[in-house]
Image: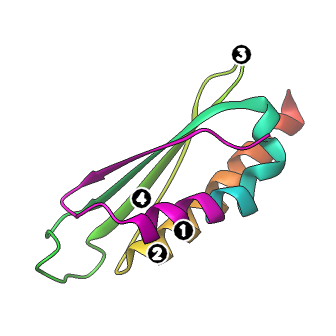
Amino acid sequence: MSLHIEIGYRGTDRSDALDEHVGQELDSAIGRFAPRITRVEVHLSDDNGPQKEGPRDKRCLMEARPASMDPVVAEHEGDDLYDVVREAARKLERVLDRRFKTS
């Protein structure tokens, strides 16, 4: 079973490569939880827009919705969208691991 992932962009252009990166990182980090998650919402933003660089201006917020449980959220900010996706996915993995161990 694969994860149902919804990706939203704000302040940056949508990219097939970035969409694929999100899917790969989530599959690697939380794929084992897929049967217990109804969907994952990923919100990617670039506060300065695609034409300007800035420190920690990229943000990835991930919200996983476990079946019959409250949603869990993880986020990360940094200078590169690919890096913030990877780190947010790792944080989400830790949050879900704790959530499912206590349920």
Circles 3 and 2 in contact, beta carbons < 8 Å:
no
Between disc 3 and disc 2, the foreground one is 2
SS at circle 2:
helix
Instruction: Examine the structure image and report whether residue 14 is included in the region drawn in magenta.
Output: yes
Q: Earlier in the sequence, mark 3 or mark 2?
A: 3
Viewed as shown, does residue 93 lie left or right of 100? left
Q: Identify the image quadrant of the N terminus.
A: top right
State if disc 1 and disc 2 touch (CB < 8 Å).
yes
Residue tagged by mark 4?
Answer: 60
The answer to whether 1 is drawn above or below residue 20 in the figure is above
Quadrant of the rendered structure where residue 57 is? bottom left
Q: Earlier in the sequence, mark 4 or mark 1?
A: 1
Viewer-side residue, 78 vs 12: 12
Mark 4 or 1: the one toward you = 1
What's under tag 1, amino acid-wise? Answer: His
Q: Magenta segment range?
A: 1-24
Residue tagged 3: 68
Judging depth in this view, the residue of 7 and 75 nearest the camera is 7
Q: Would you say residue 50 is visible in this rendering?
A: yes
* Distance of label 4 from label 1 (alpha carbons): 13 Å
Q: Are discs 4 and 1 less than 8 Å apart at CB?
A: no
List x then y, in percent, for residue 33. 80, 42
Where is the C terminus found, in terms of image quarters? top right
Q: Quadrant of residue 68?
A: top right
Q: Residue 21: which disc?
A: 1
Residue occupied by mark 2 = 82
Find out whether residue 18 is within the magenta segment: yes
Question: Mark 1: which secondary structure?
Answer: helix
Identify the residue shown where x is 73% and y is 44%: 2
Can residue 99 be seen at all in this image of the molecule? Answer: no
